[in-house]
Amino acid sequence: MPMFRRALLGCLALPAIARAQGAWTPDRPVRLVVPFAPGGSQDVLGRLFAQSVQAAGQQVVVENRAGAGGILGGEAVARGPADGLSLLLATAGQTTIPKAIGRRMPYDPDTDLTPVTQLLDSPVALLAGPNLPVSDAAGLIAYARAAPAPLPYASTGIGTNTHLIMEDLKARERLNVEHVPYRGAAAAFNDLLAGRIALMFVSVPSVLGFSGGALKVVATTGATRFPSLPDVPTLTEGAVPGFTASIWTGLSVRAGTPPAAIAFWQQAFTRALAEPALRERLDGLGATPAPSDPAAFGALMRDDLARWQRVVAPLNISLD
């Protein structure tokens, strides 16, 4: 066949290919891998999304793959087929934080996973022990800076968001604090209320769901006040200008997934986020819808990685 004719036929085929890609839809049930155990906040979020997407006509099965801080769940998608039928409910725990602290991983989140969309953004809350003579974030920071002995602060584990956010604040504000890791928020809350812990960062959902006593919440870390905690100021309101932090949740797939499949899922989950019933549930869970395109979600993760690399550089963190 003459070269010109082959080229012409190739050009004529492009619109058909584009139409086929644009019409991509799953041909069988899809799994949404939640890299945490059933019952936790991310599991609840994953199931809410699965239900919402299913209501629109697409069957989505939630698969919990807990372990290694969520890395096992990330591996399940990163090592699976690039067919658009396996989705990862992604957080920093499977993408940016392990890479920042130099943890050995069975996959590279930069090359083995592809961002689809950010879904949610949730600030964290700064808590002070009830016995501390402070009433706001500025007072807590001044107290921690002038403390003659290091004040113990809690986190939900070494290398977690709550650990690294406090280390970032510690370095910026020269706080005299020392890290006490816990396996979760519940035990840390008990020690905070008992006076064995002086302060901590914790997710807003954990604060909203706690019923074991009165927590002294002095600030949240969003750019604006969180709707469910309207009387709690942000850190940027005078205490630490410009200091924001959040726990984000997004959607990723195996690298090499067809662009049309990525576009399909971005649109499907963005539509879900627009549903009033889902938004109401998310507000009660301390999560704010934050849909984006793949490029913006990728940029968020690059910024996140750079921040945590800066924070952990002077620390001696090892989880291997």
Image (tube, rainbow, N blue to C red):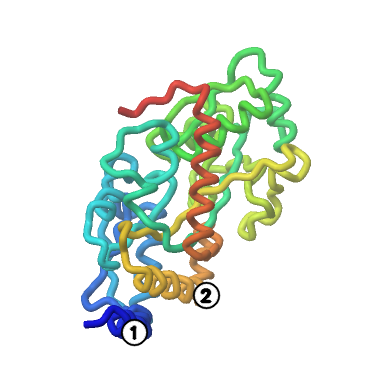
Q: Position of residue 303 (x, y in %)?
A: 54, 45
Work out whether residue 20 can be spotted. no
Q: Nearer the viewer, residue 196 or 245?
A: 245
> Badge 2 local density, few (<14 within 10 Å), some, or many (20+)?
few
Up-down relation of residue 55 to residue 229 (above or below): below
Residue annotated with mark 2: 274
In screen coordinates, is 4 left or right of 234?
left
Residue at image location 29% in from the left, 67% down from the top: 84
Quadrant hosting residue 20? bottom left
Q: Nearer the viewer, residue 140 or 4?
A: 4
Q: Nearer the viewer, residue 179 or 87?
A: 87
Residue annotated with mark 1: 8
Q: Earlier in the sequence, mark 2 or mark 1?
A: 1
> Badge 1 local density, few (<14 within 10 Å), some, or many (20+)?
few
- Which of the numbered marks, if any, corresponds to residue 272? none
Kindly identify the amino acid type of the residue bearing the numbered disc 1: Leu
Up-down relation of residue 89 to residue 305 (above or below): below
Up-down relation of residue 30 to residue 133 (above or below): below
Quadrant hosting residue 256? bottom left
Callout 2 secondary element: loop
Q: Position of residue 317 (x, y in %)?
A: 42, 25
